[in-house]
Amino acid sequence: MSTTLRNQRAQTTGSASNDPTGTKTATARRDGRKWMAALFLAPTIGGIALFTLVPIVASVLLAFFRWDIISAPKFVGLDNFASIGADPTVRVAFLNTIMFVIVAVLLQLLVAISLAVLVQTRMPIWLRTFFRSAFFFPLVLSASSVSIIMSYLFNQNFGLVNKILGLVAIPPVPWLTSPAASMAVIVLVYVWQNFGFTFLLVLGGLSSIPTELYEASSIDGAGGWKQLRSITLPLLSPTLLVASVMAVISALQIFDQPYVITRGGPGDATRTAVMVIFESAFKQLDFGRASAIGVVLTLLIMAATAVQFRLSRRFVYYS
Amino acid sequence: MTTTIQNPTSTPEVPVRRRRPVSGRTIGRAAALVAGTVLTLGPVLWTVASALQSPSQSLGGGSLFTNGITFDAFKDVFHQVNMWLLLWNSVLVTGLVAAGQMFTAALAGYAFARIDFKGRGLLFGIVLATMMVPLQVTIVPVFMLIRGMGLSDTLLALILPALPTAFGTFLMRQYFLGLPPELAEAAAIDGASPLRTFRSVYVPLAWPGLAIVGILAFNYHWNEFFRPLIMTISEQNFTLPLGLVSLQGNMGTGSVATVLAGVVLSMIPAAVVFVFGQRYLREGLTAGSNK
């Protein structure tokens, strides 16, 4: 964020200094360029205003109304918020989402950091390229297709996962019918597809750590674990903050996987915040309530981001 | 810590240069990487292998090794759903959105990078801020808006709201900032109009940036599920991800091969982009987070 601002400032002063002011043609040209700016920005600014800014305002307003599209919207004050607070399904959905985010993001960071550190160790370049490609391939697949595949793999009676577990004499796990196991499946499927993103970020962070640090510390007799703790992780911490913030924001919006794999079940075991937004709006036609849940989710996303930046003051090391 | 095992033949996975003695730790690392690769690519390979089974086969009904290979499931999926229409809808939506985003992002990115006007910083700040608003929060009003425009249950409902791109604008602005401003001066001296300078000087140089915008848009919208689920009602307007999920719902656990054949077909374009545009994809995905 700070870099963008800095670039912007540099750019403003830069173009001001090479602006040939004073002559008549320059003024005319500047007028022409103003028109050009308006023309060039019209599709993006117009589109964002229409499809993002207006909807944000509308969404917040709508949260205070009851509206089923058919009859006229009716102002109900904070009723929508009171009703979602009292609704056990919504409460469970938010609790599920928060639990999911904590477990999934920690797992995602752990897997991504481990694999990135391993890929950075000494190995032929072609092999490193292969691993790097393999680990981020799931990222280009569609979450819904992946969920279809995984619902077959985790099928209790015929799925490959239980077959493999059977080889080591583990009895079949009711992956999609037990509350705890189905949540575990959602976490695993999500992390499987998304760790590659964190992996790419961590790989970028690792490559900016000077190798001399490792050389110097191994002369001092530091081994792998020691180096990981005292060099890699501290120098990687700014990258990890970004990775964690982005992972939390996207995990809080989970929808595709539980929708396709479990439809939120068994019971409400894998129902998430976005699923209840979807159901309130497009199943129950209660658009005000859906907006109110959306507002709560947005506040949750903002709070989670703020908490991470706050905590980062203690844990993140800037050289 | 560095107990060495004098047996260099035991680790074929990670060849160690200069015949260093292979340590237990090296073996452990190699094993972890191999396990990671198997777990990552395994489900994909299983999908392809299962799609090559007979469509009469239900889940758990044998494997590639016992049944051999057949392409019947690929034929069958075209009988079960209107696969051509799903493909066409997906190509249309994804193609138009990708091209449209390249167009709008090139224009807006250029204006933010190269044209001085009042309120530029503020406007750009607003554009950036919209990137942080989750789609699910705006979806209800957007749905109303689309309905009010008479576009509900059309492909335009998917295309139109996706044309402006805050992230693409951000990327293209960075890209144009990286190109030398002297080019514009030189073009002006040669008598080129500002529009001409943009079109003939800067756009041709900005293709790598535009490729990132296009590939990211393709990847996102080809796989998109949430918006099509809400915006389309009739099957003739379904895109591939939606069509495949509804096919799976109809099929249950019977004829897994047919569903997976559809999944494999839908993965092919994504895999092609992955192979040929991986560098752009990587650059684009990590672009927003580089400090």
Image (cartoon, coloured by chain):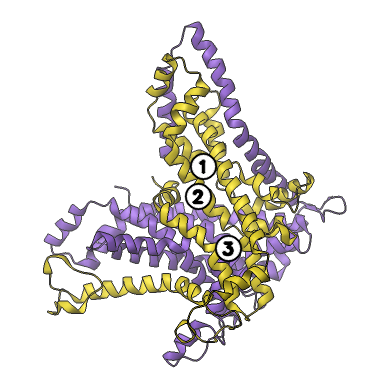
Chain colours: A purple, B yellow
Which residue position is annotated with label 3? A254
Q: Position of residue A3 (x, y in %)?
A: 40, 38
- Residue sitting at x 26%, y 52%: A209
* Element under disc 3: loop
Query: Which mark is first along the chain, 2 or 1?
Result: 1
Amino acid at dot 1: Gly
Q: Is the residue under label 2 in contact with that under label 1 (CB below 8 Å)?
A: yes
Q: Position of residue B131 (x, y in %)?
A: 55, 46
Q: Chain of mark 3?
A: A
Q: Chain of mark 2?
A: B
Residue A134 position by quadrant: bottom left
Q: Is residue A273 left or right of residue A318?
A: right
Amino acid at dot 2: Leu
Residue extending farthest to the right is: A71
Q: Nearer the viewer, residue A8 or A169?
A: A169
Residue A216 position by quadrant: bottom left
Q: Position of residue A80 (x, y in %)?
A: 75, 58
* Element under disc 2: helix
Whether A245 is drawn above or below A22: the answer is below
- Residue sitting at x 39%, y 31%: B179
Which residue position is annotated with label 1? B168
